[in-house]
Image: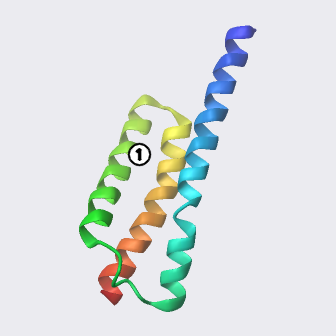
Amino acid sequence: MLQWLIMELVTLIGFLAGTFTTISFLPQVIKIWKTKETKSISLLMYVSFTVGVALWLCYGILLNEAPLYVVNGVTLVLTSSVLFLKIKYG
């Protein structure tokens, strides 16, 4: 029972950590969407970060760790959106 509770707590911490880091991208996506201005955003940074998030997603899937694949799936959508808008509005 105690081991199960600890694992649930660990999973909750993983989801909370991922949620907070994921939602940190929302203001950037919203700002770019509204202003269509991406001049100050580094293309190389978003390419490398998006690739990294995709790899974390794969890692989470391979380990079958929900906190890793759920939050990185959402983060991948957000970082890919910024990357797409950067390329579009460049």
Q: Tell me the amino acid under the disc marked 1.
A: Leu
Left-right relation of 43 to 23: left
Tell me where residue 47 appears, x and y as whole percent: 28, 64
Q: Nearer the viewer, residue 6 or 21?
A: 21
How far across and down, in percent of the image, does residue 88 sit? 33, 86
Q: Can you say whether 22 is above or below 57 in the image?
A: below
For disc 1, the marked residue is 57
Percent x, y for residue 26? 56, 68
Other residues around mark 1 within 10 Å, as few (<14) / some (14–19) / many (≥20): many
Residue at x 30%, y 86% (from the top left corner): 90
Label 1: which secondary element: helix
| Residue at the spot 38% in from the left edge and 43% down from the top edge | 56
Counting from the top left corner in percent of width and height, residue 76 is at 43, 58
61 left or right, relative to 89? right
Quadrant assignment for the N terminus: top right
The relative height of residue 65 versus residue 41 in the rendered view (above or below) is above
Q: Residue at x 27, y 58 (%)?
A: 48
Q: Is residue 72 above or below residue 81?
A: above
